[in-house]
Image (tube, rainbow, N blue to C red):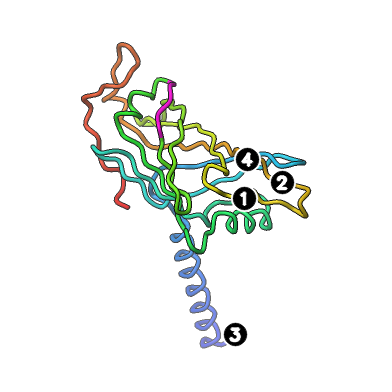
């Protein structure tokens, strides 16, 4: 028969593991409602991956987002390590994005808006195509599509033995929580420029 102290010991161990598991899961969660996908090509094949923003702020002055470099993942750990090395993750652990809210509103019919990206110690402006996507419960999302040049940020594309090399341009897709459907115009399908912006999350 199993002794009571042994049962209690096993219960304590189990509860400790469950607590640790919950803490680790909480560390991996993001409450921004934003998502990021990226894709590119190398000499022999294409690749794709995701990243997790850790802060998103939407207010009158604009939209601000930060992305920890080491949340960027593909399906290959060696490739990920090369990517972190290229981006200087130890020295520059974050990638930042910023856009004027008025530019995003004006472009949400499918045209382009200027997006400021900070990678490493350089900030450059990239055009992004913007589209509104309907979600659930009256919520809309804004999708931004853009191509980012590695050379533009003075980044050396990873290579294997100088033979396999990642191409210069990487495609990035960002989806942001946007305005409630009830606040969108119902006539011409464009944005209501008088709509009040709201804070999604404090960085």
Residue under circle 3?
Answer: 2
Q: Within 10 angstroms of label 4, few (less than 14), some, or many (20 or more) residues?
A: some
Q: CA distance from mark 1 to mark 3?
A: 62 Å
Q: Seen from this angle, which residue lies furthest top?
A: 187
Residue 59 lies in what quarter of the image?
top left
Q: CA distance from mark 4 to mark 2?
A: 9 Å
Q: Mark on residue 4?
A: none
Asked if disc 3 and disc 4 are in contact, CB closer than 8 Å, the reply is: no
Residue 74 at x, y = what percent?
63, 49
Residue 177 at x, y = what percent?
38, 37
Q: Secondary structure at mark 4?
A: loop
- The majority secondary structure of the magenta stretch comes to strand
Q: CA distance from mark 1 to mark 4?
A: 9 Å
Q: Nearer the viewer, mark 1 or mark 3?
A: 1
Chain-order first, disc 1 or disc 2: 1
Residue under circle 2?
Answer: 165
Residue under circle 1?
Answer: 156
Task: Give the residue displayed 66% in from the left and 50% down from the top.
Answer: 75
């Amino acid at each position: 028969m199993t002794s009571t102290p042994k049962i209690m010991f096993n219960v304590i161990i189990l509860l400790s593991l469950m607590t640790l598991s919950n803490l680790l899961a909480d560390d991996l969660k993001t409450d921004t409602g934003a998502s990021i996908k990226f894709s590119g090509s190398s000499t022999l094949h294409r690749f794709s991956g995701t990243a997790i923003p850790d802060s998103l702020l939407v207010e009158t002055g604009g939209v601000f987002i930060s992305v920890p470099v080491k949340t960027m993942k593909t399906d290959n750990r060696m490739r990920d390590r090369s990517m972190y090395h290229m981006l200087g993750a130890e020295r520059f652990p974050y990638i930042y994005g910023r856009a004027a809210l008025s530019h995003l509103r004006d472009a949400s019919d499918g045209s382009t808006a200027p997006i400021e990206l900070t990678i490493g110690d350089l900030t450059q402006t990239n055009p992004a195509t913007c589209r509104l996507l309907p979600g659930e419960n009256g919520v809309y999302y804004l999708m931004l599509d853009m191509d980012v040049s590695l050379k533009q940020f003075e980044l050396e594309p990873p290579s294997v033995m100088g033979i396999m090399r990642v191409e210069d341009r990487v495609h990035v897709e960002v989806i942001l929580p946007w305005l409630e459907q009830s606040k969108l115009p119902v006539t011409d399908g464009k944005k209501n420029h008088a709509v009040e912006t709201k804070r999604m999350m404090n960085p």
